Amino acid sequence: MTSTIAEELRQEAARLDIRTRLDEERRIDTDRLCEYVRHGPLLEALFDGPLDRRDIEAALGVSRATSHRFTRWLEDEGLATKVDGEFALTGQGEVIAEEILRFELHVAAAQRLAPLLSSICENHKEFVIEPFADATVTTADPADPYRPVRRFVSLVEASATLRGFNTTAMAPLTMETFYERLFEEMETEFVYLPNAVDALLATYPEQAGRVLETGRLTLFTREALPYGLALFDDRVGIGGYDEETGLLHVFVDTDASRARDWAEQVYDLFKADSDPLEGVAGLDAERE
């Protein structure tokens, strides 16, 4: 990854790298942070509007004594005020309540996306996790090592277009039916490592040469790529590969609009920093 691309991608993820914006004087005591998290359900209960103590007891399933302790904590921390017997979040309380929920969302997403994050660990700082929080995660296992490949192929079959980049072939080159659809029915634009392009053209010289001439297949090459990225008609996906076997180890896909925005930006950056495949030497001779 060039420094220019890394810098532009990090701008999107910069808000997640908050260490540079915290100094020792601004750090919040760990015990106090834990208190905020521990009271997350209470803050969430008040997020949609004021509640009295009975409402709090019913919403959280707590005793009267506990509800009194909760409301006293809210007032002591400046997170809520009592008006006409009801407790309403202050501006500070609303922000902290939302950030506690966001923290939970990110932790849950990181747990779900752990196989992908492990596969792209050297590049995950450019990967924005939140848009993929509810993504479909398909992983390989010893009993079924091709599950991620089948998921990818199923999305290709449901799409008329495909764009993206990959460190290796989109699907194993032995999957003839997949490449028949790719060559005969789809509009495809892909960035590959040079050796992946060479392998594709060597395996399917006639079909690839023909579709390249029509313009329905456009290929670019780049010396380094971080992971696999695919943009289908309605979804976007990211693939991570096993370093030892080279097989697709995990594929994560979603139809979230924010994920597509991120994927479009990333793809455009890598495409702009790639070399178009201007000629395919030897294909004409091979077809003869």
Image: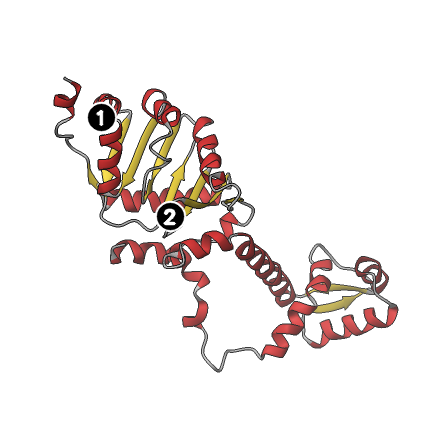
Which quadrant holds residue 74? Answer: bottom right
Give the residue drawn at x 39%, y 44%. Answer: 247
Farthest residue, direction bottom: 25
Q: Amino acid at mark 1?
A: Pro
- Tell whether 107 sits left or right of 159: right
Give the residue drawn at x 36%, y 21%. Answer: 185
The spot of residue 288 in percent (x, y) is: 14, 17
Q: Contact (CB < 8 A) between labels 2 and 1?
A: no
- How many numbered marks does the figure carry? 2
Which quadrant holds residue 100? Answer: bottom right
Residue for badge 2: 245
Residue for badge 1: 205
Q: Amino acid at mark 2?
A: Thr
User: Considering only order in the chain, which callout, 1 or 2, is on the residue closer to the N terminus?
Assistant: 1
- Tell whether 68 sits left or right of 231: right
Q: Depth check: 70 or 218 in front?
A: 218
Q: Depth check: 178 or 132 in front?
A: 178
Residue 54 badge: none
Give the residue drawn at x 75%, y 59%. Answer: 50
